Image (cartoon, rainbow, N blue to C red):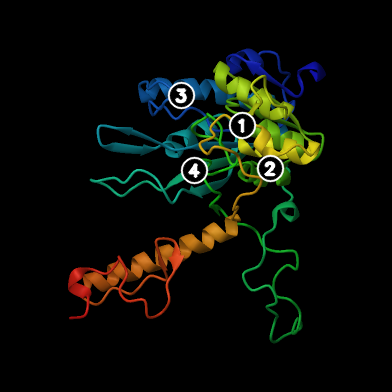
Amino acid sequence: MEHMLDTIHHGDVRELFSALPAESIDLIVSSPPYNLGKEYESKRALAVYLDEQAEVLRACTRVLKQTGSLFWQVGAFADNGTLIPLDIRFFSILESCGLVPRNRIIWVRPHGVHARRKFSCRHETILWFTKSDDYVFDLDAIRVPQKYQNKKHWRGDKKGELSGHPDGKNPGDIWMFQNVKHNHEEQTIHPCAFPEDLITRIMLPTTKPGDIVLDPYMGSGTVAVVARDFGRHYLGAETDARYHSVAIRRLSGLPDGNNSFPNLKTLRQYAAKTGEPVGRYRFDVQVAAKPTAVSRIFSEEHHLDEMEERLLFEEAAFAARARCEPIPAHPTLNGKRRAPNDGPSLFDLPGDLPA
């Protein structure tokens, strides 16, 4: 099997599975085609799609080690106005494979298409299942800052001691990693790529250096890139020649014959390593005349705080409107902080404004 490590098969994953020995993989993580009829997939009857996925998941179970984990990220199936969360359908399939449910992780997506006859869908789901109860999970590898970092016990035997873990807290099961779209340095020609940090949060606690990570639907290669960067081996398959090429180019880290890179991040890494100016090269989805050396990158904690602030405002605005009370001013206006006396915001209704 060693000759297969750190490769991406260009073809159907079932061809790859047939060559893998049983219980050889430490972690499987993927985002299978959603069957939504998007640019990169064809839409089929839901029952046919789920049967195909069941076959793949049975193969995943066979190659997964007893200590291994499987993370399956899915969205929802929409048809003629109905919406079926796919994680509901996948749950029973995964249990039928003998896998054990550990978490249902919500990946919040604050932006997207606005629905007109139902609530807009603003999240996707990551199902985490393990092969057995003897699974790997290192919480210390993924702790995040405590909300109150210096909070201490105020009475009892632990009075004066920190009440939380000094290295941080469990990140929980609601994640808000930025979607890889326009203005994201990891964006490639693939329309639905994983953020590298999201895969990092999955990979670090469930594997050790030297372990093997499999992505049956490799896409643009994010799982492979993260595995390489953190000393894990990767395996995967991708049927689309364009996306397979993007993954290989990301892993090579070198410009192609047109002095172009698959994304801005790969370009910047190459420039930092070689000392070459960033402006000498291009990347596939470049819009501006020249790429920039730096960009504004916000942490997941920033996005979570921003989302919480926004949701609290929306709830307060709804409650005020329902009671015919003045709608409170939002602290930001078009993304910019407002001074206390800037006057009404665009969120204020005409009937709520002072005469």
> Which one is in front, 320 or 85?
320
Q: Amino acid at mark 4?
A: Thr
Q: Is there a contact, CB below 8 Å, between mark 1 and mark 2?
A: no
Secondary element at tag 4: strand
Q: Is there a contact, CB below 8 Å, between mark 3 and mark 2?
A: no
N-terminal label among 4 and 2: 4
| Label total for image | 4
The x, y position of residue 143, in whole percent, is 70, 58
Residue 239 in sight: no
| Distance of label 3 from label 4 (alpha carbons) | 20 Å
Residue placed under numbered mark 1 in the picture: 282
Against 158, residue 68 (above or below) is above
Against 348, residue 250 (above or below) is above
Residue placed under numbered mark 3 in the picture: 40
The C terminus appears in which quarter of the rendering? bottom left
N-terminal label among 1 and 3: 3
N-terminal label among 1 and 4: 4
Residues packed near mark 1 inside 10 Å, few (<14), some (14 to 19) or many (20 plus): many
Residues packed near mark 4 inside 10 Å, few (<14), some (14 to 19) or many (20 plus): many
> Which one is in front, 303 or 2?
303
- The numbered mark at residue 133 is 2
- The numbered mark at residue 55 is none
| Distance of label 1 from label 3 (alpha carbons) | 24 Å
| Distance of label 1 from label 2 (alpha carbons) | 48 Å
The x, y position of residue 246, in whole percent, is 61, 25
